[in-house]
Amino acid sequence: MRNPLNLLKGFSRHFTPAFLVTLALSAGYPSAQAATPDTAPGELKNTLAQIDTAANNHNVPALMQFYSPNFTHTDGLNRQSMEKILTQFWQRYPQLNYRTELVSWQSQANGFVAETVTQITGTTPVQGRDWSFNSTIRSRQRFEGQKIVTQEILSERTQLSSGEKPPTLDVRLPEQVRTNQEFNFDAIVKEPLGDDLLVGTALEEPIGPDKYINATPVELEGLDAGGIFKIGRAPATEGKYWISAVLIRADGMTILTQRLPVVNRTTTGSASPNPPSSRPANSP
């Protein structure tokens, strides 16, 4: 029997490039106090509005006008790879809506730094099945003129669901972990299962340019409890990871992905990430 999650995982990961039209910047900028959105200059507000318009129209050439030729992203992307990924992505999934809110901004000698929250919503058919999704992305970016020079996504949470009654999840995951730190990942189904069979899995993937396009096959397992309960250990080197829960019941399915940064601390040990392992549902 064909594993349906090969398709679902590809859909989940291919959705991530849409986040790149949110506004972000790389770490290490001066820590001067940011100003409130109402004081932002018209130039910055207008640029953000034009970026949202281009994203809602899925107009890649118009959107790329706002990216510097020397654009860099902390996930390893550049302007060329960004353009390629967005073109492929919007060809596959043309029904997304973007709404960006400016949270704070700073003026710099050559431009602005802006922190934003973007909501991405929509419904997209994939091989005869309608998928609904809702994403919240918090990010910052640096502008020089009207060009985005650098980006970094600060937090990322995406939920995709399909079917008449997809599982409603309560997901518990730290905002970040230290190198070699043990952490819990719980994805709890809120509704009573009754006699329904629940299957699913947890996934952990390092974030990199190749992962934006290439789907990852997954293997499902029967779940005795009402959700997924895992213990993971962060790798010995800092990095960024996607942590996902995939849960399927008879009348629906849900995929939820969050970004988990691993921050550095002085330690020794292997740099290979350790995937989450199962733990009892009543574990702390």
Image (tube, helix red, strand yellow):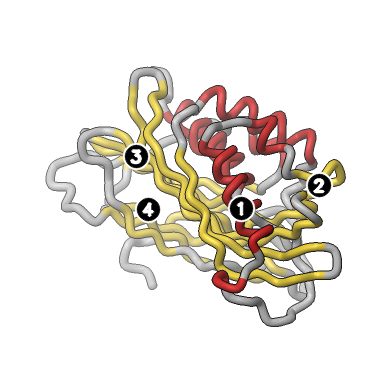
Q: Looking at the image, which residue is at 67% across and 34% down? A: 62
Q: What amino acid type is highlighted by mark number 3?
A: Ser
Q: What amino acid type is highlighted by mark number 1?
A: Leu
**Separation of marks 2 and 1 at Cα, in angstroms:** 17 Å
Question: Given contact means CB atoms under 8 Å apart, are the residues at marks 4 and 2 in contact?
Answer: no
Query: Where does residue 119 sit, x and y in percent of width and height?
Result: 46, 51
Q: Which residue is mark 2?
A: 71
Residue 72, placed above or below residue 220:
below
Q: In terms of secondary structure, where does tag 2 sit? A: strand
Q: Nearer the viewer, residue 80 or 222?
A: 80
**Separation of marks 4 and 2 at Cα, in angstroms:** 39 Å
Question: Which of the two discs, 1 and 4, labels the residue nearer the N terminus?
Answer: 1
Query: Where does residue 241 sit, x and y in percent of width and height?
Result: 62, 53
**Separation of marks 3 and 4 at Cα, in angstroms:** 17 Å
Q: Nearer the viewer, residue 56 or 191?
A: 56
Question: Given contact means CB atoms under 8 Å apart, are the residues at marks 2 and 1 in contact?
Answer: no
Question: Which of the two discs, 2 and 1, labels the residue nearer the N terminus?
Answer: 1
Question: Which of the two discs, 3 and 4, labels the residue nearer the N terminus?
Answer: 3
